[in-house]
Image (cartoon, rainbow, N blue to C red):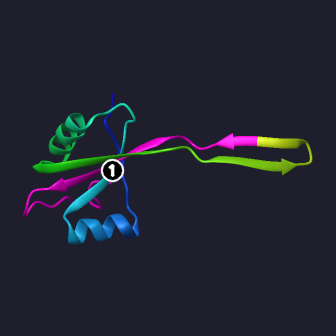
Amino acid sequence: MSILIKPIITEKATRQSELLNAYAFEVNTKANKVEIKKAVEAAYGVSVEKVRTINVRPDRRTRYTKTGIQHGKTNAVKKAIVQLAEGEVIDIYSNM
């Protein structure tokens, strides 16, 4: 089971990494905070102070087409915001 799926690179996540030293990752939906902390420390060689998780619900959409009503939804994902110790840095762009 792979814990870390991919880093989240958005304007808000970049601002958090610059100001608060916190990085955002998309993680496995079954992973807990302890597993996420160990995975980030092993993958990037940093010390993690705090982990916050967010379960993002799927978006449901309805489309009206010629053949009838089409129902669909996106996948549910889990995000983790990892705050590092003072002086620690993750260079996300070099590890991609």
46 lies above or below 93: above
Crowd rating for badge 1 (residues with CA inside 10 Å; few <14, some 14–19, many 20+)? many
Any magenta on residue 72?
yes
Q: What amino acid is at disc 1? A: Phe
Q: Secondary structure at mark 1?
A: strand
Image quadrant where residue 42 sits: top left
Residue 10: give x, y in percent of width and height. Answer: 40, 65
86 lies above or below 47: below
Total labels drawn: 1
If the image is split into quadrants, where does the C terminus sit?
Answer: bottom left
Residue 59: give x, y in percent of width and height. Answer: 60, 48
Residue, disc 1 = 25
87 lies above or below 31: below
What are the residue bounds of the magenta stretch?
71-96
Image quadrant where residue 95 sits: bottom left
Residue at image point 28% right, 34% down: 32
Residue 16: give x, y in percent of width and height. Answer: 28, 66
